[in-house]
Image (cartoon, rainbow, N blue to C red):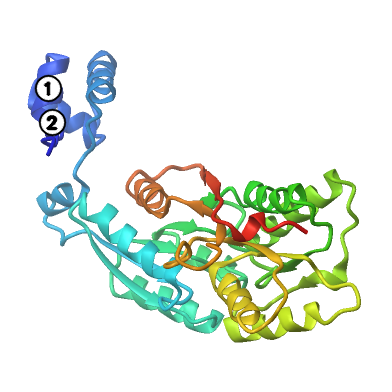
Amino acid sequence: MTARTPKPTMADVARHAGVSLKTVSRVVNQEPHVRTSLQQRVQAAISALGYRRNEAAARLARGATMLTLGLVMENISNEFYSRLAAAVEAASAEHEALVVFGSYEESAAKERMLIETMYARGVDSLIIVPSAADHSWLAEHAGLTTVFVDRVPSGLSAADVVLLDDVWGGRAATEHLLAHGHRRIALISDDDGLSSVHDRAIGYRTALAAAGVPADDELVVRGVFEPARVACEVGRLLGLPAPPTAFFATNNRAAIGILQALRERPERPAYVGFDDFALADVFNPGVTVVRYDVARLARSAVDLLLNPSRTARRVKVPVELVTRGSGEIPA
């Protein structure tokens, strides 16, 4: 096993910059009355060494309690959210910070209650996967550092957001199906008031338009994410006079619903899902998906929280198409 490289310390920065440890501490903590030339030397050393301040230690040194981050998600029972929670905990542990989390289970009222409760109990910062509801009320909590993940919040003109490249993913999935001869491609989507769902649908329509294939609203299902309901909708679509020969599901639960619907049917349409999920490679054929690095999503959010800025920032995490068989079934 390769030994881990020790993280650079303030003492390392001081040696590299040729200044005292106290000077480094004053620069890192943004204290006044440090000469510009010394600030520049310290900042250059920090960049060269990749030094990052231990926020939890700095907080404890000021007599405060341990740094606590809150994570507010839609539904922990969804595999995406359980993986996100684990990844946020791992990223936060690198800064010796604690994480508390809660699920609002598709209820905007419960989402607000969770956020306000965490704020009232002294959570330092929040990572939120926002619902489709208006979030302008968050402006009332100006002292709370917040980063949104996976979706752009409605009603906030300036917010730090970490997103997936949803448009590219939707387009790549649809182009893949088009490349295998499909022209009747159904879209199974969640609430299109969510920016992620909206952008994946844009990618789908962009790919169809580029291929000269008219978008058919008869093949678009909106606001459905429970597997059982998705299975019913898939059965209905396959019963149309001109049924789809392929499906694109904008989330993992919709992909599972497609699998349930096809289990007892003679048809073998192609399908691609957005989000990977457990056992996706075990089915026959394996499920072709748009996949991404959840750990990178979490680390990006934690980094934004621990390095606040006066200007809103937007980080885009890339996605990739993973072929396993279901998206390669020809028309």
Q: Quadrant of the N terminus?
A: top left
- Which mark, residue 67? none
Foreground residue among 96 and 291: 291
Residue type highlighted by circle 1: Ala
Residue type highlighted by circle 2: Met
Apparent side of residue 207 relative to residue 40 in the rendered image (left or right): right
Please, which residue is most extreme toward the front here?
266
Apparent side of residue 12 relative to residue 173 in the rendered image (left or right): left
User: Which residue: 29% across, 24% down?
Assistant: 47
Q: Dot 2: what SS?
A: helix
Which residue position holds label 1?
A: 14
* Location of residue 308 with respect to 231 vertically, above or below: above
User: Which residue: 38% across, 45% down?
Assistant: 308
Foreground residue among 182 and 223: 182
Q: Quadrant of the C terminus?
A: bottom right
Residue 323 image point, x, y percent: 56, 51
Residue 88 image point, x, y percent: 33, 59
User: Which residue: 26% across, 56% down?
Assistant: 90
Write down the quadrant of residue 141 in the picture: bottom left
3D distance between C-alphas at marks 1 and 2: 6 Å
User: Which residue: 49% across, 61% down?
Assistant: 276
Which residue position holds label 2?
A: 10
* Location of residue 1 with respect to 266 vertically, above or below: above
- The answer to whether residue 312 is visible is no
Residue 255 image point, x, y percent: 59, 70
Q: Dot 1: what SS?
A: helix
